Amino acid sequence: MNAYATGLAPAHSHISPIRRAEAYARAHDFDRPTLILDVDQVADQFHAIRRGLGRAAIHYAVKANPAREVIARLIEEGAHFDAASRAEIELCLSLGARPEQISFGNTVKKSADIAFAWTAGISLFAADAEEELEKIAENAPGAEIFIRLIVSQSEADWPLSRKFGVQPRAAMPLLHRARALGLRPVGFSFHVGSQTRQAAMWRPTVDEFAPLWAEARAAGFDLDLLNIGGGFPAFYNEAIDAPEAYARDVMALVEPRFPGARRIMAEPGRGLVAEAGVIAAEVVLVSRKSPDDLHRWVYLDIGRFSGLAETEGEAIRYQIATDHDGLPAGPCVLAGPSCDSADVLYERRPVELPLALKSGDKVIIRATGAYTTTYSSVGFNGFPPLDMVCI
Amino acid sequence: MNAYATGLAPAHSHISPIRRAEAYARAHDFDRPTLILDVDQVADQFHAIRRGLGRAAIHYAVKANPAREVIARLIEEGAHFDAASRAEIELCLSLGARPEQISFGNTVKKSADIAFAWTAGISLFAADAEEELEKIAENAPGAEIFIRLIVSQSEADWPLSRKFGVQPRAAMPLLHRARALGLRPVGFSFHVGSQTRQAAMWRPTVDEFAPLWAEARAAGFDLDLLNIGGGFPAFYNEAIDAPEAYARDVMALVEPRFPGARRIMAEPGRGLVAEAGVIAAEVVLVSRKSPDDLHRWVYLDIGRFSGLAETEGEAIRYQIATDHDGLPAGPCVLAGPSCDSADVLYERRPVELPLALKSGDKVIIRATGAYTTTYSSVGFNGFPPLDMVCI
């Protein structure tokens, strides 16, 4: 029961083979695919990262998992919050977060949502474009803003380089523009990319932005805030640094390069919640397309449109555990239950699963606490969204 | 107002520049991205396809748009239904469809859902694997089944070749197996692939399967049902045949190749509902990543996770209309509102949009009646699912 389907042992010591969420998933039956999330484990992970980060504040990226139980617990533990939308702000406030604990980190915001946030007392906003600064100046006059920078070289498993941020050479004009609009430009943000597995991978990014930080301060901008974003990894199958050491090593790279950054904030999402969750799902069909096919097709009752969106492009490779692990295995294409041909999880790199696997068998999909529940569709092909149990 | 953003005129005559759904979208304001669906237009399209199909029965692919208004209207008009799940069966039954009007077309079904369907009176099931036949025999003893075949050469914009069906050379053993299990193998199904733009593109597929049909009948299987699946196109930007002519030409290809097929069924989804809907959405931000960038980034309040999932891989290219159409335009990367870098609609092939476009402007996304509402996530990044208005 405890063996990994892949035959790999966990690469860092803080993961024991069976943790509380997985034990719960194995011990219970579920009507439909269900995420079991261990909120104590989230709190433990929060404190491990916090110990490593030292003086930096953790703004939990709410989008990773906006479960009320998670937000409430993180408020108790002293977290701050990075909100992507008005609804995420309302959620945090409704559970008792103070507005000064919340930053509005999406660089793409509707005017009405900026006005809402400002009226609610939130005063820290992200921007990466002139039109965004104009909207903030109009709807949150005098607010603090940080300029998001494009990371040119990402070593992340899920790079974010294209969509967000401004080229560093275009950042200074935005600082000037912000000041001219009556806003308070207080710093920069960047994101090394989701699932950046080792702290050492942060070096090219902090090296790239340090000169811009110095240039802006020399130009008379009183920058004191550096938002180092997310990128904190979860363990899927490849080695990652343990959370406290990871955070400490990142801070060791950051501190000497950004003098005067009195406020440092980090925005872990995946790194805080992913490992605290497992999904219990079921095999619906095992087949071969022809008798001489080497690999089988294994269809689960969960797919890309019901929780496992991050398998797109086979970017995130979840570990799958079954009751047959340890018995002879073979390669499988893994697919979801819908009538959509895009609903295939792993095909280019097939998954090794036990030959004994059959319809009705339970499977456990590990480290699925992040970016699953809310990515789930409302009712694609009539299949219900991913269910969740917090323990 | 009437010009197409792309500068292309519609390629077939049944689309006038502004139809009822679009007029409604232009005349009203919406709090959030909203699909406006013209149910009369769905009915018109149903009858156009039916005229072309002649004796074949239309099983509407419920997954394309399971709005109660659509299902109820199609029941009135005499449609049958292709259901992908238990929930879709329940929906059709609850609105008055009789069980004999419904086929359970997903080749991947849970045993409990097969049993549910059988008890509800549904007697026609799809299968493409031995284990699926065993589940059907156990839970729907004596049911009619059709074997889904893999289409090897698809000319569709969104081919479905990999995930569903069995290789033709493995089909005969499944017919034998079905009979041995006490099931009634009555025919074959195939799917030429979603958005197959011209009827002529069906030829290689029907040519491929005709010999298998003959072989099975010669071997003593009393096959009388041919399910030609979906593939009926919608007009996005590329020329398609008009619906009645398309359906007629497909039947002209099918009829001579499958003698004895007393029952022919077709499963249009997109082809029935896509053009009857438009989405009203809003520009949230227009920016350039650096002053010398040739193209702009245009961020909408709708993206891949809130209704436009079919832009994955830029497969489906929706037409975008704005109030500035006809004024000078330039290339744009089009992206959604979430903090997810995968939430980009068109980047490899940028979209031409007016240079005057700015935050707050309304955009109309045409031919979005299919595969939008239910593909929408429950609350990705805190953004609500796509709203819908039926007119």
Image: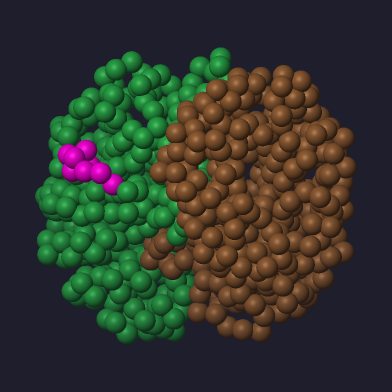
Chain colours: A brown, B green
Residue B88 x %, y %: 33, 68
Quadrant of the rendered image containing residue A92: bottom right
Residue B365 x %, y %: 31, 38
Taking depth in this image into account, of A36 and A340 the one nearest to the observer is A36
Taking depth in this image into account, of A39 and B2 the one nearest to the observer is A39
* Quadrant of the drawing holding the N terminus of chain A: bottom right
- A28 up-or-down from A125: above or below: below
Tell me, yes or no, if residue A273 can be seen here: yes
Taking depth in this image into account, of B221 and A293 the one nearest to the observer is A293
Name the chief secondary structure element in magenta. helix
Tell me, yes or no, if residue A333 can be seen here: no
* Quadrant of the drawing holding the C terminus of chain A: bottom right
Identify which residue is drawn at 39% across, 82% down: B115
Quadrant of the rendered image containing residue A81: bottom right
Residue B40 x %, y %: 13, 52
Task: Decide whether residue B27 is among the magenta residues.
Answer: yes
Magenta region: which residues? B23-30
Taking depth in this image into account, of A68 and A153 the one nearest to the observer is A68
Tag count in the figure?
0
